[in-house]
Each structure stands twice: as structure tokens, then as C-alpha cells.
């Protein structure tokens, strides 16, 4: 690409704010946000992320069946641990107290705080999307002849789960902090 013709797609992607990035990952979010029904948008986001976590867990349950079928018990504990962690995180996300409730009440919030929340949301959503893809890849590429590769992948997946959990906690703290400041 010449220097006279800048990468327009790259510039557009760079200029997107975090809410626009979220809209690309969460179908239906824009319509709720346009109607200012932020509680519904928050619930939609949480449920879709919990669904993704559940799909990641289902991939690992499929992987566990393959591992057991192959008699490859060396990684069984790590697979089971990842399944449990995903199940717990999915439940926390799906059943969390409804966020952004203060936005619909007469509490005013400035745009920078709202953008900060969108940033936390985007960070969490991205982590979950990547985690779901990694779990699916582990399941689809499992080869009983190379269990050491699986152990490495499971170790990386454990880090991804931990990262998603940390981002979820940061998001919750941000929402709670804004609601407390606004009350």
C-alpha cells in the first residue's frame, strides 16, 4: 500500500470507540443502547458472554470424552479443572446483579465514565471470545499421540480463564464504583 493511500480500513477500526467495538461482538446491543435501555443491554451482554463460556465448557467436555476414550489420563485433571472454572465463571456472569442500573435512574454519569465502562466491557468480551476459540481449537485438534501439546494448550487456556475472570472482576468493580459515586 502506498504512503499516498492510507489504510482506510485500519483508520476506521482505530477510530472506533469501545461501544462500537462491543456492537460488533454482541448482536442486538446497538438497538437497546439507542433506546437507552442500558439494563437490557447489560443483561444481553452478560447472557451472551455466559453462553460463550458455556460453549467453551462444552468443547472441553467433548475433549474430556476424547481424552478418556484414548486412555490419556495425564491431562484429565487439567481438563476437569478448566471445565469447573468455566462453569463457575459462566454462572457469575449470567447471574450477576444487573449492572448499569444507575444509568436509568436519575443519576447522571459523564461520557468519560461511560466510555471507561465500555472499555472494561470490550476487554472482557474480547477475552471470552478468545477463550471460546481456544477451547474449541483444543477439542478439534486433540491428538492422543501428542499429549504434551495438549498439556501446553491446557496451561495456556488456564491463563486465559484467569485473565477473563480478572477482567470480569475489574468490570464489576468499575460498575459498582460508578453506582456508588452516583448515588
Image (cartoon, rainbow, N blue to C red):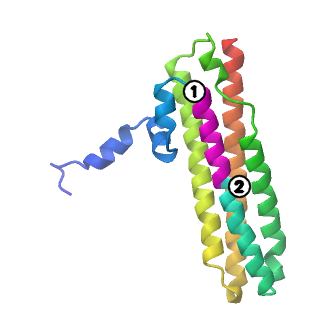
Crowding near pointer 2: few (<14 within 10 Å), some, many (20+)?
Answer: many
Q: At numbered mark 1, what does the secondary structure look like: helix, strand or loop?
A: helix
Report which residue position mark 2 lands on.
161
Report which residue position mark 1 lands on.
38
Q: Residue at x 65, y 52 (%)?
A: 51
Q: Does residue 97 appear to the left or right of 167 in the view shown?
A: right
Q: Does residue 66 appear to the left or right of 40 in the view shown?
A: right
Quadrant housing residue 120: top right
Q: Does residue 114 appear to the left or right of 2 in the view shown?
A: right
Looking at this view, is 20 or 13 the one in front? 20
- Residue 171: in magenta span: no
Decide which of tag 1 and tag 2 comes sooner along the chain: 1
Residue 2 at x, y percent in the picture = 17, 55
For the N terminus, the image quarter is bottom left
Looking at this view, is 181 or 22 the one in front? 22
For the C terminus, the image quarter is top right
Q: Marks 1 and 2: which is nearer the front?
A: 1
Q: At numbered mark 2, what does the secondary structure look like: helix, strand or loop?
A: helix
Q: Is residue 137 above or below residue 13?
A: below
Amino acid at each position: 500500500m502506498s504512503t499516498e493511500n492510507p489504510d482506510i480500513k485500519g483508520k476506521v477500526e482505530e477510530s472506533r470507540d469501545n461501544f462500537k467495538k462491543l456492537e460488533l461482538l454482541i448482536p442486538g446491543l446497538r438497538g437497546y443502547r439507542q433506546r437507552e435501555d442500558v439494563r437490557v443491554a447489560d443483561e444481553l451482554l452478560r447472557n451472551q458472554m455466559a453462553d460463550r463460556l458455556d460453549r467453551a465448557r462444552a468443547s472441553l467436555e467433548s475433549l474430556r470424552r476424547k481424552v478418556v476414550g484414548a486412555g490419556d489420563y495425564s491431562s484429565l485433571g487439567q481438563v476437569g479443572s478448566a471445565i469447573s472454572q468455566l462453569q463457575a465463571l459462566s454462572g457469575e456472569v449470567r447471574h450477576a446483579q444487573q449492572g448499569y442500573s444507575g444509568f436509568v435512574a436519575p443519576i447522571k454519569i459523564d461520557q468519560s465514565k461511560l466510555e471507561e465502562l465500555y472499555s472494561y466491557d470490550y476487554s472482557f468480551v474480547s477475552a471470552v471470545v478468545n477463550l471460546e476459540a481456544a477451547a474449541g481449537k483444543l477439542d478439534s485438534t486433540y491428538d492422543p499421540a501428542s499429549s504434551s501439546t495438549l498439556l501446553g494448550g491446557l496451561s495456556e487456556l488456564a491463563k486465559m480463564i484467569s485473565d477473563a475472570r480478572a477482567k470480569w472482576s475489574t468490570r464489576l468493580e468499575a460498575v459498582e464504583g460508578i453506582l456508588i459515586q452516583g448515588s
